[in-house]
Amino acid sequence: MTRQFLFFRIFVVCISAAVLFYTAQGISQQSQAPTRDVVEDAQTPRQVPSKRPEQQKNTHDQSDIFGGASALPSSPIFQNQPDQGRMLGFDFARDPLNAKQPMQPAEEIQKNDIADKPKVMAAQKKLLEQRYNLAPKLDPDIKMTRGKPLAVGPTARLPNGLSWQSLAQMAPDALRKRGVFPYPSLPHPKHAAGGMVFPDAQLEMFPRLERFDVAFDIPEAFLPEFPPAIFLQNRPELGDVSRGEVVSINNFHRLFKDIVTPVQLDGLRLLVTPFPQEEFNPTDDRKTLQPSLGVACLDCHVNGHTTAQFHLNPDDRPQHRRFRLDTTSLRGIFNQQIHGSKRSLRSVEDFTEFEQRTAYFNGDPTHAMKKGMNILDRIEVSHMAQMQNMFDFPPAPKLNSLGRLDPTKASQSELRGENLFFGKAQCAVCHAPPFYLDNKMHDLKVERFLNAPPDGPIKTFTLRGIKESPPYLHDGRLLTLEDTVEFFNLVLGLKLNEQEKKDLVAFMRAL
């Protein structure tokens, strides 16, 4: 072997090693979550220096002739007609939603909203602190799937001189007349505007979802994990497939290309694709500083679950009659027959189509054309539904295949709680195993205890994996499972003692 050939062999080996090293580095970097949100990056123009003459703003560019009020009438005859031929009221196509007067500039509304935001949130904070003890007490042992500790309640503040036992002895009329029912409805911080509001942990990762007029109100300790775990009913052996990432347009293909079918993967693509929405869109109606492509389905149903984002329900009018609506989990949706708190949509496909067409626009489809219509083909809707139907509940190792406790694995407190659940506490009337729901609507008639109008029937929500979905009830007024037990103890007149309440919570944590 000549010296030149030997050097050549060494050179080839070195080059090959370098290629393998940098290829591995590239693969390793690809496997990491991107540092920038692709959606936000795509809709943000780059600032470039104004070097060319055509980039300069001239007098014509800066004149006020382009506004609607500056337009000359098409005929001088209009001077003698009613209102001089002009529209003096609101013009839906151009005036921002909830403008105070016609032709009000969007910049003025934005400026006022930004100035009012501290007062709006201070009032909401004061309300919450009057109702709840917001200093979280965390369970030292029980945690959610990815390790977040559970907040322990009850958190509701009781009037001086009253205890849970004394409240339970009072008739509904007495509670109403004295105004001491501890769980009135939880309002949106800015009800006139309403709309989706996202928690701070999510805004840190996706600042495009931040609003200039209102902020999230419930402390982070009382919310689900972020990011939440993901379980797939078609691949239960994999356990949590989230790998600690929030699924978005940035990473969905990398995370799921080897796990789900091409049809399901396409459905996931659509679920992480932003569509225009009432408060997140490119028009003057938006509540974000910059025009937005909108929100994706999985912005609210993060990882097929929830981070307790809230909205107003889209199926009541007038505006002040609507109620706050907590985002529900999509886990186990494959086995549910009605969808939405009030809407009773009968399939996941109908739910998906309704959300995108009207719920995104506060139940008003006439707003969709102005803000950005996106009519999904029924095939696309079915792809989205196929992916949603893959989201499963977290494992419940103490339950058998029928959804009941395995006595060899459960604690005595959990077993006592199960007996209460199916007996004295009456929970199983609506929450039947194995999925702990009945696919029906029920009216708790909470107005018996409050000087407030009735909410009417609300769908039964599944209790599987319930410890990972705080806060509770349709508007999130119950911050912990202990609050939930106290609420139903009063509403249903159960007369549970303190040990029974603890046992019932222990059982629900095992679901």
Image: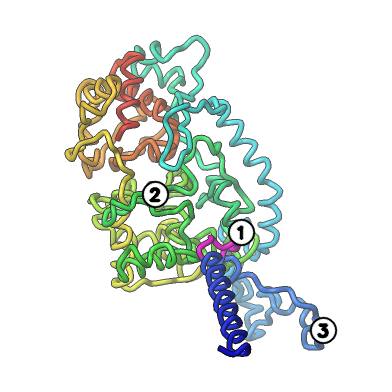
Residue range of the region highlighted in magenta in the rendering: 31-37
The furthest residue to the front? 1
If you read the primary sequence from the N terminus, does the residue marked by circle 2 or circle 1 appear first?
Answer: 1
Q: Gap between marks 3 and 2, in whole Å?
A: 54 Å
Which numbered mark, 3 or 2, is in the foreground of this view?
3
* Three-letter amino acid code at the position of disc 3: Lys
Locate residue 55 relative to residue 412 in the image: left or right: right
Q: Quadrant of the N terminus?
A: bottom right
Q: Is residue 218 visible?
A: no
If you read the primary sequence from the N terminus, does the residue marked by circle 3 or circle 2 appear first?
Answer: 3
Let me know if residue 158 is in the magenta part: no
Mark 1 Cα shell of 10 Å, populated few (<14), some (14-19), many (≥20): many
Locate residue 151 relative to residue 44 in the image: left or right: left
Q: Which mark is residue 51?
A: 3
Badge 1 is on which residue? Answer: 288
Q: Specify the quadrant of the image occupied by residue 16.
A: bottom right
* Three-letter amino acid code at the position of disc 1: Thr
Badge 2 is on which residue? Answer: 316
Residue at horizontal 40%, vertical 67%? 270
Tag 1's secondary structure? loop
Please provide percent x and percent y for residue 452.
42, 32
Q: Gap between marks 2 and 1, in whole Å?
A: 25 Å
* Three-letter amino acid code at the position of disc 2: Asp
In depth, the one of 91 and 58 nearer the eye is 58
Tag 3's secondary structure? loop
Magenta-highlighted stretch: main secondary structure? loop
- The colour mode here is rainbow
Q: Quadrant of the C terminus?
A: top left
Please provide percent x and percent y for residue 137.
52, 25
Q: Specify the quadrant of the image occupied by residue 257.
A: bottom left
